[in-house]
Amino acid sequence: MALTREDALRLDAQDPLAPFRDRFVIEDEHKLYLDGNSLGRLPKGTRERLHRVIDQWGSELVGGWHDWIEAPTRAGDTVAEVIGAAPGTTLVADSVTVNLFKLVNAILDAQSYAKLATDQDNFPTDRYVLEGIARARGLELEIFEVDPLLGPQPADVPEDALTVLSHVAYRSGALADISAFPESVIWDLSHSAGAVPVNASAMRYAVGCTYKYLNAGPGATGYLYVREPDTLVTPIQGWFGQARQFEMERPYEPAPGITRFLAGTPPILVLAAVEEGVRITAEAGIDALREKSIAQTDLLIALHDQWLDPLGFTLGTPREPHLRGSHVSLRHPEAWPICKALIERADVIPDFRGPDSVRLGIAPLYTRYVDVYDAIDRLRDLVERGVHREVDQTVSRVT
């Protein structure tokens, strides 16, 4: 394991993915960005693509829809390539929250479940959606406890419940083995797709976002995956999900395939950004990205053990590579002011997850080994000097 800066630079020189960094907008090389698990960087190709779509809008006006109308499924097939799914099973539309609402209700309309379930540590929006659906349908919602480090295990899943789980836990970074769980689980791939291989053949349903490791931009559209889309009918019946869409005098009839999960008019500029962000990920190859992610998180953990453990940090992420995704949580009682000091005094961008985690995300497309080394070096320095106790510790809305 490289524990010197020279070794980190040597790894960067040998990195086959290194050329991809030049395809992203990086205006300040001194600023170390380790928050790609929250929002990916801007690909240069996205900026160029958006200008082309804007020009197309200006010149073609409504005639552009002959190209744009296929954008949700075209982008969906690109996402499908990254998550290992078959073409025609993935749709880019709406948000994770809306897609989960659609998917859970569609499954409940088609199948009988005694209750809904998720784990206490699942991402809040997933729990909130289930709470609302359970209340509306008069169902029980079971929220079960899991190991905070390792995340949900197959034995935790109730047999009689429609269960929603995250492939990578948003706080600890714990990685679930999808193939070990029941096929009926709905998976949230938001913190895995684009950094971790997804075994789509082992699952029937999934949702996810595109603005993290898929680099589609802030608030970019989400996606949903259904292995056999014709077996379900969306609860939100909109004209873009209607068979023979422009025969407008007809009553609603779901379109064939994954298109039936569309509702309103899709956001074309956003979908163009999704396509570009996902394509660069697909080009790099998920296996190569995973290999680099493991090596870089190994480096981060080794530096934690050498430098941060003596300063009161504990590792909040599994050590075993096959049990973790592409971000590492460093736990410390003063995690919030440490995060603020990193941003304000050390030019390092992490994020904070309560109650006590400094979360550092590795985005292998553009994160260098030396970025990891320097970030932990700066973190060690500011905590040793007590700089985090000098910053305003007021908790802001965005953390």
Image (cartoon, rainbow, N blue to C red):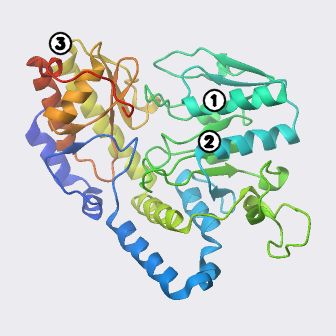
Where disc 3 sits, the SS reads: helix
The mark total stands at 3
- The percent coordinates of residue 276 (x first, y second) are 44, 65
- Using residue 142 as the reference point, say whether residue 172 is left or right of it: left
2 up-or-down from 256: above or below: above
Label 3 or label 1, whichever lies nearer to me, is: 1
Q: In the drawing, what numbered circle is on residue 97? A: 2
| Residue closer to the observer: 134 or 371 | 134
Dots 2, 1 in contact, CB < 8 A: yes
Of 392 and 292, nearer the camera is: 392
Judged from the image, the secondary structure of the residue bearing numbered disc 2 is: helix
- Residue 117 in the image: state x and y as whole percent: 70, 24
Residue labelled with disc 3: 310
Q: Secondary structure at mark 1?
A: helix
Quarter of the figure that contains the C terminus = top left
Q: Residues within 10 Å of mark 2 (few under 14, many from 20)?
A: some
Instruction: Name the residue rendered at 57%, 64% in the picture.
Output: 267
Q: Is residue 156 above or below residue 45?
A: above
Q: Residue at x 35, y 62 (%)?
A: 43
Q: Which mark is residue 23?
A: none
Residue 128 is marked as 1
